[in-house]
Image (spheres, rainbow, N blue to C red):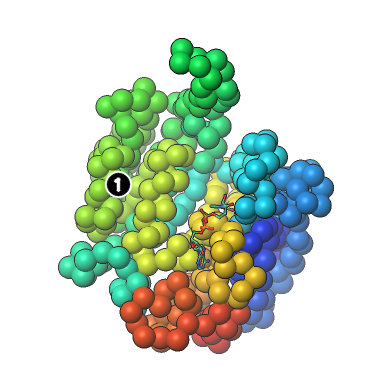
């Protein structure tokens, strides 16, 4: 089969890690008889430099006309002082909205071989964990009305959160469907003791949950969830939550896996064309030094094969090669921990994964 993939390498370590994922996909193509056609588009800081806009129309059109989109990361200190509407991060929000992807799936699990890179106590790690965070992606406070105004105590700023029943219903369904394919448990995270949007969230999630009697559904307040994630992550299977809570909690979940460089994500909507990207940023501190861990981006490519193209064997093959590379003690600097391994770079890690496909 032929698949057309839009590539957005972006800024910082983006080009290095996307090149790694492309090399892996090319090898998978050879092994299983598929052709992956890649077309590069600009977004983020590099797009601002080239066109003055973080998300040029050509990029939006190119992505919409592709079978799927693989993104590295955008942003960096060079563009940090630009006004909000032309900041690199604007490209991410714009792209998610243009592609209609309202769900972000973020798996987080402990790799037995990486226990030493995990920051939790050994007795907690030994219980293991394997969760997926289902984050609402195109609503809530990141998309609400915001601005500056004159307030009671002088100049002030405000951001607003709104969620419609429809937005909550569709994300809740994604979570319950995901739970059916896993261990059958959904924990819905909100701040219903304070926020009206959270009260609507809770009501709606439970109403949808009635259609899934085979899945258990529990509520948890976000402050408690932040504690439980480090206290007993084994209790989480599928977590469903709003845009901002999901953003924060998935970074916390990434930390307990051992490295942010290991976490992939898939952003999905009603069409099959999704957006696949690592959850980490552009890591300007290590950009251009061949130090980045490409695994999160390569795992994102595996999610693309599974969700966008229904290529499960191919996705499993990539995931197994990554399990093997880690079990063999091969490490980039971010996951060395106290393993005693000599860290290798982004390119060498990619080659080691390819050898094991
Ligand atoms: P970051 O995720 O880029 O980096 C945090 C830390 O993790 C850094 O020490 C970095 O070196 C390390 N790290 C991240 N990815 C790694 C990898 N693959 N391998 C090894 N180490 C890795 O977060 P930040 O420093 O807060 O943000 C840097 C820039 O990235 C900012 O401009 C931010 O806005 C942007 N950002 C972009 C995205 C995105 O494109 N989706 C997401 C988050 C942040």
User: Outermost residue, front direction?
Assistant: 154
Looking at the image, residue 172 sits to the left or right of residue 51; the answer is left
Alpha-carbon neighbours of circle 1 within 10 Å: few (<14), some, or many (≥20)? some
Based on the displayed image, in which of its 4 quarters is residue 225 positioned?
A: top left
* Percent coordinates x, y for residue 66 in the rendering: 72, 54
**Residue 9 location in percent, x, y?**
68, 61
Residue that appears at 17% across and 68% down: 123
Front-most of residues 288 and 300: 288
194 left or right of 1 in image? left
Whether residue 266 can be seen here: yes
x, y (%) of residue 357?
54, 82
Residue at x 65% of width, y 43% of height: 81
Image position of 139 (left or right of 81): left
How far across and how far down the image is residue 214, in percent? 28, 46
SS class of the residue under badge 1? helix
The residue that disc 1 covers is: 226
Left or right position of 212 against 322: left
Q: Which quadrant of the view contains residue 244?
A: top left
On screen, residue 312 above or below 187: below
Q: Is mark 1 within 8 Å of ligand 1?
A: no
Give the residue displayed 47% in from the left and 52% down from the top: 105
Residue, x 74% and y 55% (percent of image)?
Answer: 46
Give the position of the N terminus as an image quadrant: bottom right
């Amino acid at each position: 089969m032929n698949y057309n993939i839009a590539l957005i390498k972006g800024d910082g370590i983006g080009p290095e890690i996307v090149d790694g994922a492309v090399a892996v996909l090319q090898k998978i193509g050879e092994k299983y008889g598929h052709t992956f056609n890649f077309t590069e588009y600009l977004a983020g800081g590099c797009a601002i430099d080239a066109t003055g806009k973080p998300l040029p129309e050509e990029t939006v059109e190119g992505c919409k006309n592709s079978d799927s989109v693989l993104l590295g990361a955008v942003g960096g200190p060079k563009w940090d002082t630009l006004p909000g509407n032309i900041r690199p991060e604007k490209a991410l929000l714009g792209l998610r909205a243009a592609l209609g992807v309202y769900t972000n799936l973020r798996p987080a699990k402990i790799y037995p071989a990486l226990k030493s890179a995990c920051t939790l106590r050994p007795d907690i790690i030994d219980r293991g964990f394997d969760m997926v965070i289902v984050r609402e992606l195109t609503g809530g406070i990141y998309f609400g009305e915001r601005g500056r105004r004159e307030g009671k105590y002088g100049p002030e700023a405000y951001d607003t959160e709104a969620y419609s029943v429809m937005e909550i219903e569709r994300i809740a369904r994604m979570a319950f469907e995901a739970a059916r394919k896993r261990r059958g448990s959904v924990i819905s995270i909100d701040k219903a003791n304070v926020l009206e949007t959270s009260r609507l969230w809770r009501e709606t999630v439970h109403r949808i949950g009635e259609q899934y009697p085979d899945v258990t559904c529990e509520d948890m307040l976000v402050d408690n969830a932040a504690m439980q994630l480090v206290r007993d992550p084994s209790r989480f299977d599928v977590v469903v939550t709003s845009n901002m809570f999901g953003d924060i909690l998935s970074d916390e979940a990434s930390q307990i896996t051992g490295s942010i460089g290991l976490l992939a994500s898939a952003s999905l909507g009603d069409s099959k064309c999704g957006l696949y990207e690592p959850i980490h940023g552009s890591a300007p501190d290590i950009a251009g030094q061949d130090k980045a861990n490409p695994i999160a981006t390569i795992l994102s490519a595996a999610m693309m094969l599974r969700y966008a193209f229904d290529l499960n064997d191919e996705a499993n093959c990539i995931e197994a090669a990554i399990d093997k590379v880690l079990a063999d003690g091969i490490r980039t600097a971010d996951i060395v921990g106290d393993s005693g391994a000599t860290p290798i770079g982004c390119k060498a890690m990619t080659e080691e994964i390819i050898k094991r496909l």
